[in-house]
Image: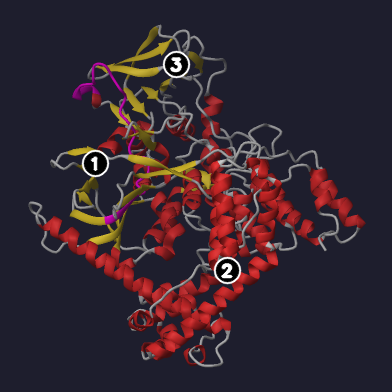
Amino acid sequence: MHPHTSSVRTVLQWINEFKRIDIAREIQLDGSTKNYVMEFGPIADKLRDVKTDSVGTALGKVEEIDKQRCGERLADDKTLEKWTQFLEAKKAFKGHKAFDEAAGLVEQARLAKDPREAQKHLASARQKLWDNTPDKLEKTDIPGVPSGQSARKIDPAQAVKALKRKDLESLIARNDTWGNFDPAKALGDKATEEDLKVLLNIIESAVEADQQDAAWKEYEDKVNQVIAKRPGAPVDAKVYKEVILGAGASAAYYIASNYGKFDMKNTMILGNLQPWAKDRGKDGNVNHPHNQTDPQQKGNKPIEDDEKGLAARAELSRRIAEVIAKVPHTQCTIEKVRRCQGDFFEIETKEEGSFYASKVTNAMGIGKQKEPDLDPPAGPETKAHMHDMDSFKQKLDDGTAIKKAYPKVKSVCVSGGNAAIDVITAIIRDQGKNPSDDKLDIHWVVGDTGAPAFLNGTDNALAAEAFPDGNLVGGGPLIKNNMKVYRGRLTGASGAGPVQVIATYSDPPRSKTMKTHKFTVDMVVYGTGPDSEAMQRMFVNESSVGKDEPLTLEPVIDKSRHYNVQIEEKNPVELMKKLQGKLKDEQAATELKGFLEDPSLEKVVDNLRDVIVSVKSQDSEGAKSTMQFVGASGARMQTNNGSLTPLSPRDPDVRHEAIASLPENVVGNDQLTAARSRIEAQFNSLPTSSDDDVPLVAVEGGINFITSNQTVIRVHIAECYPKIPPGLGDYVTGQIIFERSQRTEKGKTPKASVPIPTPTEGDTWMENLSLKQQKDFQNRWTKRLQDISARIS
């Protein structure tokens, strides 16, 4: 678990900077900033009047301090000595390219006069051996290298110019680490190391901002020259630094994870606000609770109410809208996204014309349901009796009965597996609430597997209870009450009503021998999954001859390993040996030994495969424009032969550690819970409270043990329980992930588990679905961490 353990220091530093970043953001947005401007204005005025000589002297002092501190770190760690001993002990590997190159770099480090250069050479030596480790050489044997500050060269005249920026107050707020920065002292003879570091950080930020502004102006001018030559394009088009496509859950997760990084004046959200609420109907619930789906946690209690149950769609939509409102937004329908010659993106919208951007983030979700692949295609007279699952459920909004919404329908064919469960559930609940209405005859074509994945702890329980007993090896149908279930897929539909339906299946399964089911119904409702091909057609490259070609994508790998597990010591006995001398007393040792050897805690298996968390545009060298997919769309799309194609769950290159580490009620990477988790991992995000922006890793019990990735959990342990040593912290993190993700009856999966309701009490059951097991899991691990920490001396 080293990858995320090593990031703890960086993240904890981020926690200390969080308030300053928040203040800087308020100043930038001109919101409620009078007090902050009064606080930082006088400091900014003094820095704007500073002289070049004074800045040069201060920068020289920082240079000497950097050298001294780097030398001290290398000496205290005995880094060169360790590398010399390592090279001698492993001299059998001489002749291996990486080993010889590392030896050469160590020699350069020995001869370097500047310790920062020595540190740089040693870090390069470690990286070469790590990337190309000789056979039989253990990576754990490669010596470490203390982090060091590289030489920072800033021209004093350039610094003085940068300090005259209009937004200097914001840069001061972001960098005033101790909140007591005094420019006169920092530039004088009595400047402390702390004073000089704050001054340098402010100067570096200002210089970098100047460079970024100049680079952006140059890019913007070049793009506008290209746009002006396009037919019907404006002369001075607004070019955004980033356009976010979509205004639903994935967009909200992305904004919450990256809010401090946006340049608000140059960022725009395009799309219809939370379209899912309208598509699925504004009433009802989603199949996961708020603690698994909200863009931001409210307060410091991950589970708001253990009796609250599944998230109400209207309330979740309101919370999503709150986050979307933080960024400029244009309500519109996106029709085409084109990467243009000239290194920029054009986004065509139905209502607002074209938008232009350097960076595009696609957070549009999975899109509409794909129409069944029928041969021959259904004619207009038949399509009048066919509905996708979203439009079907829309007509049942506000409690409208099926008999009222579809008065002539007495039989229905439901086509689809997992997605179509929602249709079956809606029909069953309708029948329970309207018992006097005639029951629909249901023909459910469930797909080739013949086994929908019913989610535990959700209203899928209604459909699971209605599902007939037996198996569909022979194709079916299985019959229970008014439902017939068939294995296969919908391949034919004809007639102006009733509809003649054909479902095709292989017999035996997965063979080339095909057979058919034929029956007649009044209506067809399909929920066969999203139309990935429609999304493919939206994203194109403009070729040199002006034609559109498929956009080429490549995978985004989770390099920080938020999901992979590598625990240095998985053996409780060996771990206890390493903890000797760190425990309070014999009783504490006995109690901790009992915890580590608890038979209910299974060992976590190492898993270091690359995990794909999303996809991005394949950018040519030197390109400034780029596009990334996040959330559900990132889970559904990948590259195959250089084109944008649907993500196949059977592809051996696709890694599912994201959902494998989450509770049992998460079965797909495109679900809300998984989408939020993967976005947080993709952007190294830490959860904050929506009430006061408090970083929750610093609050005992504040993070969500149900869904947090291992980096968040490990950082939380390091921040709130600093006495727990690294090895034990890694072990406990692994056990939390393992225990919550078990998919067996004996596993302690934190899921809602209550008796299956009758259809008539389905609505009430959904609203009052107990989250007691999740609450117990959260509280038990908080208490367990407190107990472990109390036993460490």
Nearest to N terminus: mark 3 or mark 2: 2
Nearest to N terminus: mark 2 or mark 1: 2
Residue 99 forms part of the magenta stretch? no
Does residue 43 appear in this view? Answer: no
Is 664 drawn above or below residue 792 in the view shown? above
In which image quadrant can residue 34 be found? Answer: bottom left
Determine contact: label 2, label 1, CB under 8 Å.
no
Secondary element at tag 2? helix
In-front residue for pair 178/620: 620
Quadrant of image for the C terminus: bottom right
Please name the residue that numbered disc 3 is placed on: 486
Q: Residue at x 16, y 43 (%)?
A: 544
Please name the residue that numbered disc 2 is placed on: 115
Secondary element at tag 3? strand
Specify how the rendered protein is coloured. Answer: secondary structure
Q: Indicate which label's residue lies in the foreground, 2 or 1.
A: 2
x then y, percent, for residue 283: 42, 46
Q: Residue at x 52, y 80 (%)?
A: 62
x then y, percent, for residue 580: 85, 55
Residue 359: give its label.
Answer: none
Measure how far apart labels 2 and 1 are at the Cα level.
50 Å
Secondary element at tag 1? strand
Nearest to N terminus: mark 1 or mark 3: 3
Magenta-tinted stretch: 358-382
How many numbered markers are drawn?
3
x then y, percent, for residue 775: 66, 51
Q: Is 371 situated left or right of 6 in this image?
A: left
Is 637 drawn above or below residue 226 in the view shown? above
x then y, percent, for residue 113: 56, 70
- Kind of residue at disc 2: Pro
